[in-house]
Amino acid sequence: AQSVTQLGSHVSVSEGALVLLRCNYSSSVPPYLFWYVQYPNQGLQLLLKYTTGATLVKGINGFEAEFKKSETSFHLTKPSAHMSDAAEYFCAVSTNSGNTPLVFGKGTRLSVIA
Amino acid sequence: KAGVTQTPRYLIKTRGQQVTLSCSPISGHRSVSWYQQTPGQGLQFLFEYFSETQRNKGNFPGRFSGRQFSNSRSEMNVSTLELGDSALYLCASNNFPGADTQYFGPGTRLTVL
């Protein structure tokens, strides 16, 4: 079985500061890892994903994440927060077997203070 | 390409009623998954359909059902609604099961009174 833990249900940063959202996963097979963002009253938008290959992946809106197998982590970062980054962020895991749905973390709400 | 569309966007029902939600996947996508999002439980997988067949089912009671049509459009049905069924229901599509990216629709907000 797979699981995802997102540390911190709410993170608050100042505009221009570093954004760091933490995600740890559990998977018995090589994982696919994802970060999705959700704005109020909207669905989920894919920010970035890791499947195979390079462990540092870059996504949209200046976000990136690094897959660290030894730490079972996939933390999301952005060097400089913008007001428009305020949203809820979800980390998710699946596998390449084709038989496992996405398993999501509980989400982290990011607030950006002017 | 148009994205995943879901109808209706908002729905209010009373306990005991039933409801049907609709999802149209991205053109060419044949796999559709449904998720329930609530403040308490977060995002939980309901079921997945591919080529009109249910491939996976989450841990939900039999009141929750779904189907997929030959044009890949999908519906989910909830019978005998309970207050706890109030949630955002999200549909996601991808090319085929196991494809590495799912694309989500805007969701249907169901309120049960």
Image: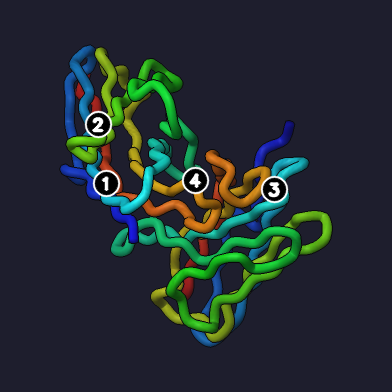
Q: Distance between the residues labelled 4 and 2?
A: 18 Å
Q: To which chain does the residue with label 3 belong?
A: B
Q: Where does label 2 land, which residue?
A: A68
Q: Which of the 4 quarters of the picture holds residue A112?
A: top left
From the image, state whether disc 1 or disc 4 is nearer to you.
4
Q: Where does label 1 land, which residue?
A: A25
Residue at 19% x, 41% y is: A10
Q: Distance between the residues labelled 3 and 4?
A: 21 Å
Q: Where does label 3 land, which residue?
A: B25
Circles 1 and 3 on the same chain = no
Circles 2 and 1 on the same chain = yes
Image-based side of B77 in relation to A92, left or right: right
Q: To which chain does the residue with label 1 belong?
A: A
Three-letter amino acid code of the residue under disc 3: Pro
Q: Tell me the element at label 2.
A: strand
Question: Would you call the spot at circle 4 few (<14 residues within 10 Å), some (14-19), or many (20 or more)?
Answer: some
Three-letter amino acid code of the residue under disc 1: Tyr
Q: Tell me the element at label 1.
A: strand
Q: Distance between the residues labelled 1 and 4?
A: 15 Å
Q: Tell me the element at label 3.
A: loop
Question: Residue A11, position in %: x, y?
Answer: 18, 35
Q: Where does label 4 land, which residue?
A: A96
Residue at 53% x, 87% y is: B16
Circles 3 and 4 on the same chain = no
Three-letter amino acid code of the residue under disc 2: Lys
Label 3 close to label 4 by CB (< 8 Å): no
In this view, the residue in front, B97 or B79, is B97
Three-letter amino acid code of the residue under disc 4: Asn
Question: Upstream in the sequence, badge 4 or badge 2?
Answer: 2
Question: Residue A98, position in %: x, y?
Answer: 55, 52
Residue at 28% x, 29% y is: A76
